[in-house]
Image: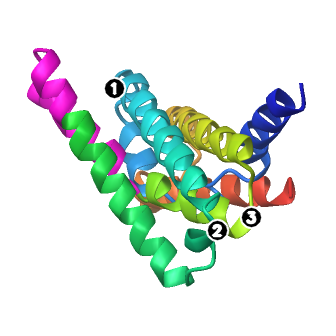
Amino acid sequence: MKVIFDLLAASLYVSLVQNLIFNGGYGISEAVRMSAKPRKLIPLAVFMTYFSVTVSAICAALELLPKFHAKSEFFHIAVFSAVVFAVYIVTMAAVLIYGKIQPKTIRRISIAAFNTLVMAVPYINYRSAFTFMQSIGAGLGAGLAFLVAVLLINEGLKRLDLNTSVPKCFKGTPALFIYTALLSLAFMGLK
């Protein structure tokens, strides 16, 4: 029961309180880009969650090795990057071998794998000294955080476009940046 609680607690913590998109800025450029095309959001969020969880699990398993755990922080970052690359290569090989896939899906897999959010999750797990299940929960939470961020930004875009009281010089990108900054402040207040 404690294992399930650790997984769920870490997932909720990373997705809501420590939303890596708004608090850390990881993956914000992709979140803003996806907010304009929300129908493409679900496949990308699924791929990002897959990569976050898989990479977190592998890196957390490596942390259990005493010789690996004793290495320098730079070594950890290099290994975490190599794990992301290896998971990407294995995933692409499996996708290309076992199924017909559209070029758009291959592009989404690439964007999801090398997003700064996915790259940051194992490092944050390492710095937070998360257990194995907490690391998996953090991976799930990172995918959920991306989904929440894109949906909130999308809703803000809709409301900003409909609002006639926004001055012309603030329409579009400036209003989006101000809105995203206010969301970031709101999520920082949850800490």
State which mark lies toward you, 1 or 3. 3
Question: Which residue is labeled 2 in the image?
Answer: 66
What is the distance, in whole Å, between disc 1 and disc 3 at their CAs?
A: 32 Å
Picture coordinates of residue 175, whole percent (x, y): 51, 55
Q: Which residue is at a point 28% across and 45% down the rendered structure image?
A: 88
Question: What numbered label is drawn on residue 40?
Answer: 1
- Indicate whether residue 130 is drawn in magenta: no
Q: Reading the chain from its start, which is encountered first: label 1 or label 3?
A: 1
Q: Residues within 10 Å of mark 2 (few under 14, many from 20)?
A: few
Question: Which residue is labeled 3 in the image?
Answer: 128
State which mark lies toward you, 2 or 1. 2
Count of numbered badges drawn on the protein: 3
Q: In the rendered structure, which amino acid carries the disc numbered 1? A: Lys
Whether residue 16 is visible: yes
Picture coordinates of residue 21, whole percent (x, y): 58, 53
Mark 3, secondary structure of its residue:
helix
Which region shows up in magenta? 93-115
